[in-house]
Amino acid sequence: MKDIVLATRNPHKTRELSALFQEAGLALRLRSLAEFPGAPDVEEDGATLEENARKKAVSAARAAGLDALADDTGLEVERLGGAPGVHAARYAGPA
């Protein structure tokens, strides 16, 4: 079984994806970034969701010494020309 680090500290996301991998019969064990206390937080300042995911995956792989899996999410509304996209969390202004 191969270990892969999931670039998140969210235990729910780790459990959910681990279950999906297991159901698919993949011989992979997902490890949370929380298992690697020296792993830095990554500033999600990329221009695209893909850039942010790549940045998180590279950082997690380096910190854990394992292959990594990462994602970034955003809301893309066709009527708004794809906005807010990568800026979804900040689109409406400060919380």
Image: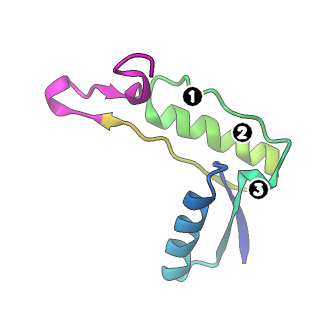
Q: Horizontal placement of 36 versus 48: left or right?
A: right
User: Mark 1 against mark 2, which lies toward the viewer?
Assistant: 1
- Residue identifier under label 2: 59
Residue segment shown in magenta: 76-95
Q: Horizontal placement of 6 versus 17: left or right?
A: right
Mark 1 closeness class: few <14, some 14–19, many ≥20 residues within 10 Å: some
Cα distance between the residues tagged 1 and 3: 21 Å
Does residue 72 sit above or below 22 in this rendering?
above
Q: Position of residue 94 (x, y in %)?
A: 44, 17
Residue at the extreme left of the image, as rendered: 79
Residue nearest the observer in this picture, 89 or 83: 89
Q: Secondary structure at mark 1?
A: loop
* Residue 80 lies in the magenta-colored region: yes
Residue type highlighted by circle 1: Glu
What number of labels is visible?
3
Q: Earlier in the sequence, mark 1 or mark 3?
A: 1
Residue type highlighted by circle 2: Ser
Mark 2 closeness class: few <14, some 14–19, many ≥20 residues within 10 Å: some
Does residue 58 sit above or below 85 in this rendering?
below
Q: Residue at x 74, y 48 (%)?
A: 61
- Residue identifier under label 1: 44
Q: Secondary structure at mark 3?
A: loop
Q: Horizontal placement of 85 versus 66: left or right?
A: left
Q: Earlier in the sequence, mark 1 or mark 2?
A: 1
Q: Residue at x 72, y 39 (%)?
A: 59
- Residue identifier under label 3: 66
Residue type highlighted by circle 3: Leu
